[in-house]
Image (spheres, coloured by chain):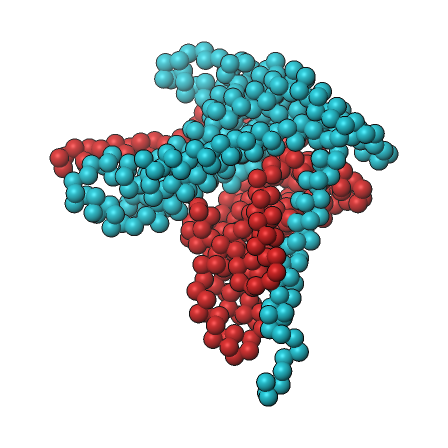
Amino acid sequence: MKQRISVGTILIYVALTIAAILWIFPVLWMYGTSFKPEKDILLSTALIPRPTTLAHYLKVLTEASLPRWFFNSVVTSGLTTTLVIMVDAMAGYAFARVKFPGRDLLFIIVVATLMVPQQVLLVPLYVHIVRLGWINTYTAMAFPRVGLALGVFLMRQFFQGLPRELEEAAYLDGAGRWTLFTRIAVPLAIPAFSALTIFTFLGSWNDFLWPMVSATRENMYTLTVGLANFSGSQQQEYGAWMAAACLASTPVLLVFLLLQRQFVRGITLTGIKG
Amino acid sequence: MKQGRPFLRSSTREAISGYLFALPYLLFFCMFVVYPVFHGFWLSLHDFNVIDNSSTWMGLANYQTALHDETFWKSLRNTAYFTVLSAPLLVLAGLLLAMGVNREFKLKGLFRLIFFSPHVLSISVVGSLWVWMLQQKYGIIAQALGALGWHNPPNFLFTPTWAMPAVVVTTVWWTVGFNMTMFLAGLQDISQTLYEAAAIDGASAWQQFRNVTLPGLRRVMLFVGVQQVIASFQIFGQVFIMTQGGPYGSTRVVIQYIYENAFKYFKTGYASAMAYLVFLVILILSVIQLRLQPDQGAD
């Protein structure tokens, strides 16, 4: 009996390890290839480049519009994430804690829009920003995502989970809602903010369809859109493309590495899983 | 009463602060969700020109056109095919990976990171990377398959029967980490004492999974399942970058067809009508899932 279990356990770990190697391989290979000289790229399957070269990086950093696209992505995702955290935290708090007429109906309407696929919004949003004259602006790229309901839903779930007693003492001392919110609720919500930051930042940084539609000038492309065009126009220059892809991926990988500890905890706390 | 009456009744003050707290979000919500949802429906009933802002009433003509449009139906079938292939695989693989990395071992943190990390990459990186790995001759996958004894495998992305499965594999690699994380959070909520009690009663690993893990995950399962079908049905980036809908339209999905109509042929009204039909399909699928799920968990 004991023997049987440990064989099973070993098999599980072997399977897990094989899966992990398969999963990480494409990423390592991408980084490895970005340092390979052009003539080695097609012929060598080695993960670790030998000899190595920085030529591809120099090329994309000096020739392509990559730095500009990078800047656009940082501004768009940064603006989106900041707005989402502020606006969703306040609304989530109101829906969870403050009593006002029509609150529950309002919340049901907001949550119902979780069912609306984003592509239903695509065409009317485009018409909307054309009329506003917002094409090729950061506002157009960032604002629509702030209206999405997921963050409000998560923040409400989180604030509902906080014990009321935490606020009661301060409330009896005559503290207003704003004080209760900024002094008590917000400091406790840091893990939930981490989870929401990761969701929003990743979603915005990697969004493809909306930035492609709302930014038509090359100097307003985000990295995701720019890279897609870049690989279309530079079919043969694999090395340069790999270097560009690595430059685009490293910042998000780092952000994720820094915040990942809070991530699962944040998901648990916001009760996203029901 | 004596010590200075507040200016307003406290319930009124409370209500006002409630509205003020919700107001900033509600402005964004009305402007970028509510208004477009209704405006999209209005557009679907019109022939609308973005450039000179003119519109002609069409009634349901756009919907009728869609229902008789063979390409629309083909793209819906392709989308359904992708969803049927990818959604169960993504839910099942997510669950298995979560159970694997929920075990206590030294490298569990590293393994979780590895399985989630592709999700951090953008679709233009993922798509092009896989196009390259899937190349017929020099592609790393063709070489690996050759080493395993499958010499001269087909040119996956250029063969109608293989293109969609290749897109599915790419999608699983890219997004399964998200489902894994959701399941992981759910697994960590199941009380350890339930497993201990089951073990004392002599329950096998399979019985523990069947009677403790699965019921404990019922709500996560519902969330991940519904969310995954919606996400799969909205596939766009992968085919747009990897196959452009080819070969011979075998991977053209419905969002791509909507995109082409709106932004290539400027048929704004027609694109909106198709978007609404897709919305209807997604809604029906979600309702069916919500109806089915509780019964599965109950037995």
Instruction: Name chain B's colour.
Output: cyan
At x 68%, y 45%, the residue is B34
At x 44%, y 46%, the residue is A273
Say above or below: A245 vs A257: above
Q: Position of residue B112 (x, y in %)?
A: 39, 42
Q: In the displayed structure, does residue A152 sit left or right of residue A143?
A: left
Q: Nearer the viewer, residue B213 or A133?
A: B213
Q: Is residue B221 visible?
A: yes
Q: Nearer the viewer, residue B67 or A187?
A: B67
Quarter location, residue A72: top right
Q: Quadrant of the C terminus of chain B?
A: top left
Q: Position of residue B267 (x, y in %)?
A: 76, 26
Q: In the displayed structure, does residue A142 sit left or right of residue B178?
A: right
Q: Is residue B51 visible?
A: no
Say above or below: A189 vs A196: below
Q: Quadrant of the N terminus of chain B?
A: bottom right
Say above or below: B170 vs B203: above
At x 65%, y 17%, the residue is B71
Q: In the displayed structure, does residue A118 sit left or right of residue A197?
A: right
Which chain gets the red colouring? Answer: A
